[in-house]
Amino acid sequence: MPHRIGFIGMGIMGRPMARNLLRAGHSVTVYNRTTSRARELEADGARVASSPRDCARGNEIVIDIVTDSPDVEAVLFGPQGAAEGAEKCSVFIDMSTISPDVTRGIHARLKERGIDFLDAPVSGGDIGAQKGTLTIMVGGEEAVFERVKGVLEPMGKRITYMGPSGSGQITKACNQVLCAINLLGVCEALALAQRSGIDLERMHQVVTGGAGSSWSLENLGKRIIQGDFNPGFMVRLIQKDLKIVLNAARTLGLPLAGTALSHQYFRSNEAHGEGDLGTQAMYKVVERLGNFCGGSR
């Protein structure tokens, strides 16, 4: 059944996600602070809104995927915010990665306005967004999730209800722990091969068939070998996510040493002006630490 959907945030992830909704037959209104990014979807049939409020007006469902907690609060509750234009009984779906505590606060504020809210962060990167194969982890009221699950299906392959408000964000935090630490293992394995004179492509072909294989090894390892540090997911964005993880761990009194180490490696990337590179640029840190280069050609 086609729905009227507002979609806020036309970045690396948002544009292909909105395009997949259009291809599925939904009526989609899009908004982005940089209007040119939103206009790229006009050829696919999207209407371009002038503000978040305009994007929400007349739509049953409003989706956003923006950078951080303050950005979500701004597009929802700031001047010309989407909450001003939303109808009662509409559903807001935040697909950003933000603080679980902020998420719960947003849920409460929207509930006071008669608006339902789900946190539904995603994993799978730009490739998953383009192919519609994202993993989507959802928090909020289960009845609301069941109402709108069909809208998520053009964007994701694995869509899972995780529990009350904030549960999606906690699950995404767990995912980011795994991504960061897996990537550190990939970088160290490639560094060992490089310094030992092993052919990197051949090593990669072998170990992706073994017990040590992972998404990071198969995809980011390949990019490292090819010298491709273009972002599927930027260093500065995973740093934002890891801060969320470490803040949650601090609240729980939980030591996460591997996550903290990965965070420090990415901080070295940022110190060298590499924050807008893909997360696979962690390999550059390993190169600097080992005083070698040439593995990434």
Image (spheres, helix red, strand yellow):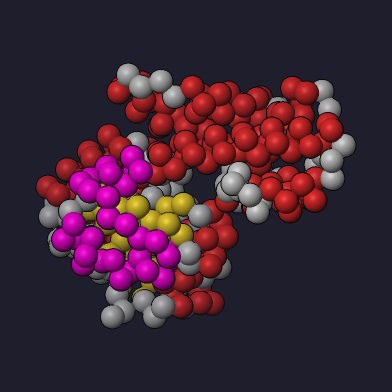
Judged from this view, the residue extending furthest toward the front is 210
Please tell me whether residue 110 is drawn above or below residue 148 in the rendered image. above
Q: Is residue 86 magenta?
A: no
Say which residue appears at 29% left-offset and 75% top-offset: 3
Say which residue appears at 46% left-offset and 60% top-offset: 134
Q: Is residue 128 at all visible to an observer of this figure?
A: yes
Say which residue appears at 46% left-offset and 78% top-offset: 23
Of 120 and 157, nearer the camera is: 157
Of 144 and 29, nearer the camera is: 144
Q: Quadrant of the C terminus?
A: top right
Q: Position of residue 267 (x, y in %)?
A: 60, 26
Say which residue appears at 41% left-offset and 71% top-offset: 154
Please tell me whether residue 11 is drawn above or below residue 154 in the rendered image. above
Of 10 and 31, nearer the camera is: 10
Q: Is residue 83 at all visible to an observer of this figure?
A: no
Magenta stretch, residue numbers = 142-171
Q: Is residue 152 magenta?
A: yes
Locate residue 283: give its quadrant.
Answer: top right
Q: Is residue 27 left or right of residue 19?
A: left
Q: Position of residue 119 (x, y in %)?
A: 30, 50
Q: Quadrant of the N terminus?
A: bottom left
Q: Position of residue 92 (x, y in %)?
A: 27, 57
Numbered label tally? 0
Q: Position of residue 147 (x, y in %)?
A: 21, 67
Q: Is residue 144 left or right of residue 276?
A: left
Locate residue 191: give its quadrant.
Answer: top right
Q: Is residue 133 left or right of residue 143?
A: right
